[in-house]
Amino acid sequence: MLKHVATMASFSKLEIDSILQIAHRMKRNPQDFRKVMEYKTLLMLFEKPSLRTRLSFEAGTTQLGGHAIFYSVADSPLGKKENIHDTIKCASRFVDIVMARVNSRRTVNELIQHASVPVINALDDWGHPCQILADFQTIQEKLHTAGLSGVTMTYIGDLDNNVTYDLARGAIIMGMNFKIAGPSTPEFAFSDDALAECFELQKKYGGKLTLCNSAEEAMSGADVIYADTFQSYHISPDLQESRLAQLKPYQVDSRLMQLADPNAIFMHCLPAERGTEVTADVIDGPQSVVFDQAENRMHAQKALMAYLLNSPHCCA
C-alpha cells in the first residue's frame, strides 16, 4: 500500500516503533541491508539547502544499494515553469521514491496528492519528520530505553518552528511528556493550528504537551533538552537584534542544564550557533549528543525508505 510522510502525524505509534527498530538494526549491522534499494532510485528535490539532509539521504541510499538523484528546485522552481502536478507525475514514472525539502507544506501536500511513489517530507514550514525519527532513535540509545513512553522532553526557544511542531506530534504519539517555553509575543508562539492538532492527538495517544511560563519551569526534571537555531534561514538580518533580545532568556546554558535530570541529554538539530541558542560548554559538553543525533539522520532515513518501499529485507 502506497504511503507518504508529511509530518509525524502521518505515522501511528506502531509504525514509529517499527521504523525505529529497523533503524537500530541497520546501524548495528549495515552489511545485512545492502540490497534493500537494489535497482531503486531516490529523487531528492531541494528548494532549501541542507548539508545533513543531502549527505544523509544520498549516502544512506548508496549503502542500501540504490541510487540518489539530487535536483535543485532553485534551477527550475516547482510550480513555476511546470506545475507540481506534472512534475511529480513525470518523476513517478522514473524513480521509486521522492524526498522533498521545500519552503511550504502546500508543496509537500501537492506532491503527495499526485505522486504514485512514496513522498517523504524532508522539511517544510510545518514539519520535519526525518529529524524527529533520528531524534527518537538517539533518545532510545542514550537513555537505554526500548520505548519512549514517560520520557520528559523539553524544548525552549522559538516555538513557531517546524521542528517544534513535529517533536510535539511525535512525542504525544509515543507517550512522552513534551514541555515547551518561549517568548510570549505572537512571532514566537506555538501555532494555534498545531496546538489544536496536538490536543486531538492527546485524545488518541498517551503523550502530553505542556506550555510552560518560563525556561526554568520547562527544564525542571527533563530527561531530554532540545534547542534549535534562533536565526532560521528565512529571518531577515534586520530583525536579528530584536529577536535575540527576546530569545536570550531561553539560551540553554549550564545554569539551566542543572535544573534538568542529572542524566539528561542535550540535543540540537544543527546547524548551531554557540553563544546564541546554546553555550559552548553545553553543546560541547558531556551531556551533548548532537553528533550522534546527526549521524542517526542517515540510519533513521534508511529505515524509513525501507519501510515505505515494503522491503522484504527488513522483516524481523
Image (tube, rainbow, N blue to C red):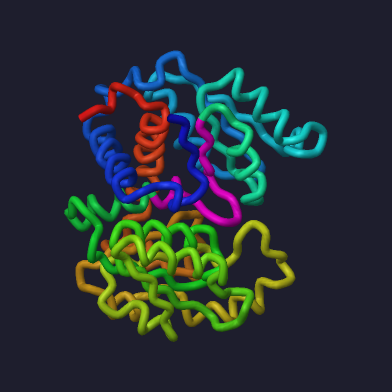
Quadrant including the N terminus: top left
- Name the side, left or right, on which 261 lies relative to 2: left
Q: Please say if 64 is above or below 173.
A: above
Q: Please say if 146 is above or below 30.
A: below
Of residue 123 and residue 228, the one placed in the foreground of this image is 123
Rendering coords of residue 155 (x, y %):
41, 69
Of residue 259 and residue 223, the one placed in the foreground of this image is 223
Quadrant including the C terminus: top left
- Name the side, left or right, on which 285 lies relative to 268: left
Count every numbered label the image shows and give the total: 0
Rendering coords of residue 132 (x, y %):
41, 52
Quadrant of residue 298 within the rendered picture: top left
Residues drawn in magenta: 118-132
- Name the side, left or right, on which 293 lies relative to 120: left
Quadrant of residue 79 within the rendered picture: top right
Magenta stretch contains residue 296:
no
Magenta stretch contains residue 119:
yes
Of residue 232 and residue 106, the one placed in the foreground of this image is 106
In the current view of this chain or complex, which residue is farthest to the top? 39
Quadrant of residue 207 within the rendered picture: bottom left
The residue at 33%/46% (across/down) is 16
Q: Please say if 247 is above or below 116.
A: below
The residue at 49%/69% (across/down) is 277
Rendering coords of residue 139 (x, y %):
28, 55
The residue at 32%/75% (across/down) is 257
The residue at 18%/54% (across/down) is 145
